[in-house]
Image: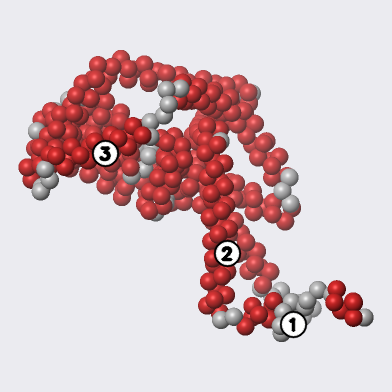
Amino acid sequence: MIEDDERRPPDRTAPGGLRGTWDRLPWLVRSVVMWSACLVVLVTALYLLGRIAVLLAPLAIALAVTLFLTALLDPVTRLLRRLRLPGSLAALLTVLLLLGVLFGTAVLVWSLTAGQFRDLAGELDQGVERTRDFVTSTLPVSEAQLDRLTEQAQAGLERGSPDPLAGARTAAEVAGSVLLSLVLLFFLLKDGRSMWHWVVRRIAERNRTTAAAAGRAGWRTLGAYSRGTMMIALIDAVGIGLALVLLGVPMAFPLALITFIGAFVPIIGATVAGVVAVLVALAANGPGTALLVLAAVIAVQQAEGNLLEPLIMKRQVRLHPAVILVAVTAGTLVAGIAGAFVSVPITAVAYRVVDTVQRHRQQAAHQSASPEPEPGPA
C-alpha cells in the first residue's frame, strides 16, 4: 500500500497540488501569464509562417496573382459558357483574351512612350535638383547635410543589392511564375467550381455550411476588389492625365500610366505617382504649375477615396487605412513589389472569411442557447 501511494501521481486538484497553487495566485498574475503564453505562441506561429512565405515566395505570389486574375475574368468565362461554349474552350478563349489585351497594351504603350521614358528620367532629376535648392534655401538644412543623407541612402541600397547572379535568378523565377499563373488560370476558370465543391465535400458535415459560406464571401470579396481596383485605377489615370494635359505638363501619358499602375498598391502607390507627377511639373514648368498639379492630384485622390471607392467597391472590401499600410509594408518586406500588389486583396479576403465564420458560429450558439418553445394546447 505504501509503494502504491508513492507511485501514485500527485493530485493536481488537491490544496497543495498544481491546480491549487494556480488558483491561489492573484488574478492579475494569472492574466499576465496566460496572455504572455498566448503572445509567445502567436509570435512563433507568425515567424514560422513568415519563413515559409519567404521560402515559397514565388509560388505564393503566383497563386495570389492567379486567384486575382480568376476573380477578374470569371464573368467573361461565365458569359462564354452561357453562349453554349464548352468549359475548356471558354477558359482558353478567356486566357487568350487576357494575353491579347496585355500584349496589345504593352505594344501601344511602348510605341507611344519609348522615347518619353528616357526624357522622364531627366525631368525627374531636374525636379529633384529644384526641390533640393528649395529645401536648402528655405529650411535650416545645408547642402552638406543633404549630401550626407543621400550618400547614406545610396550606401544602404548598395549593401542590400543582390549578387550578380541574382538578376538571372529573379528573371527565371518571374518567367516560371508567369507560366505557372497562366496554366493555373486556365484550370481554375475551367474547373474552379468543381474543385471547390470537392473541397467542401471533404469537410466535416457540421462545419460544411460555414466553410461554404466563408468561401463564397471570400470569393465575392476578391471579385469585387479586382474589378473595383481596375476601374478606380483607370479613373485615376484618366483624371490625372487629363489634368496634366490641360496644364501643359510634358510626358502626360507616361505619368498617367504610372498612376494607373500605382493605383494597385493602395495609399503608397498613389502617393508615389503623385510625387513623380509634381516633380516633373516642377522641372518642366516651374513651381506654379507644380502646385496646380499637386492640387489636381489631391482632388482626384480625394474624389476617389470619398466618392468613387464607396460606389465602386463593395462595403465588405473596404479596410481601415492603418490595416492597409501594415499589409502593404508586410507584403513589400516579404516579396518586394509583387508582395505589395497582392497583400491588400489577401488581407481583405482573409478578413471577410474570418468575419463570416465568426458570424455563423455566433448564430449557431444563439440558436442552441435559445429555449425551444413549449407545445401549445392540443
Which mark is drawn over residue 14?
Answer: 1
In-image side of 21 versus 309 (left or right)? right
Which mark is drawn over residue 37?
Answer: 2
* Quadrant of the snapshot with the C terminus: bottom right
User: Nearest the camera: 194 or 137?
Assistant: 137
User: Nearest the camera: 318 or 48?
Assistant: 48
Q: Residue at x 56, y 81 (%)?
A: 26
Neighbour class for label 1 at 10 Å: few (<14), some, many (≥20)? few
Q: Position of residue 78 (x, y in %)?
A: 56, 31
Quarter assignment of residue 8 = bottom right
Neighbour class for label 2 at 10 Å: few (<14), some, many (≥20)? few
Say which residue label 3 marks.
152
Q: Quick one: label 2 or label 1, which is nearer the N terminus?
A: 1
Quarter assignment of residue 359 = bottom right
Q: Nearer the viewer, mark 3 or mark 1?
A: 3
Q: Position of residue 16 (x, y in %)?
A: 71, 83
For mark 1, give the secondary structure. loop
Name the amino acid, label 2: Ala
- Asked whether residue 185 is in view, the answer is yes
Neighbour class for label 3 at 10 Å: few (<14), some, many (≥20)? few
- Measure the C-alpha gap from mark 3 to mark 1: 64 Å
* Tag 2 near tag 3, CB within 8 Å: no
Q: Residue at x 23, y 25 (%)?
A: 121
